[in-house]
């Protein structure tokens, strides 16, 4: 296993970690016209319970 021979400076550490960015999740509008809420893709809508045009969970 590779082990660093010298301690990495704080400037180098911060410049390396500056690339660790959190990204906002991609949201889509629910295809159900009655709902229209923003949801995550490939997941059933938590508001109306539909996925790809069919009812998969009970509505809240």
Image (cartoon, helix red, strand yellow):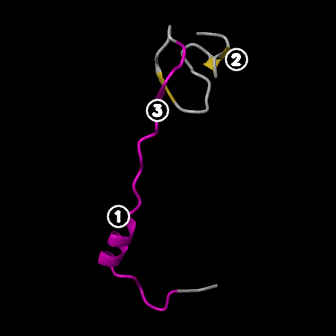
**Measured from the top left, where is residue 46 in percent x and y?**
57, 20
Q: Which sits earlier in the primary sequence, circle 2 or circle 1?
A: 1
The tag on residue 56 is: 2
Numbered circles on residues, count: 3
Magenta span of residues: 4-32
Q: Which sits earlier in the primary sequence, circle 3 or circle 2?
A: 3
SS at badge 1? loop
SS at badge 3? loop
The answer to which of 25 and 10 lies nearer the viewer is 25
Q: Quadrant of the C terminus?
A: top right
Rendered view: 42 above or below 44: below
**Measured from the top left, where is residue 11 in percent x and y?**
29, 76
The answer to which of 23 and 31 lies nearer the viewer is 31
From the image, state whether disc 3 or disc 1 is nearer to you.
3
Q: Which sits earlier in the primary sequence, circle 3 or circle 1?
A: 1
Q: Is residue 52 left or right of residue 9?
A: right
Q: Name the residue beneath numbered marker 1.
A: 18
Q: Residue at x 57, y 21 (%)?
A: 45
Residue 52 lies in the magenta-colored region: no
The tag on residue 27 is: 3
């Amino acid at each position: 296993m590779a082990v660093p021979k010298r301690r990495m400076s704080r400037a180098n550490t911060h410049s390396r970690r500056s690339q660790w960015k959190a990204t906002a999740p991609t949201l889509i509008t629910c295809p159900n016209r009655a709902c229209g809420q923003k949801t995550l893709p490939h997941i059933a809508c938590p508001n109306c319970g539909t996925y790809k045009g069919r009812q998969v969970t009970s509505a809240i």
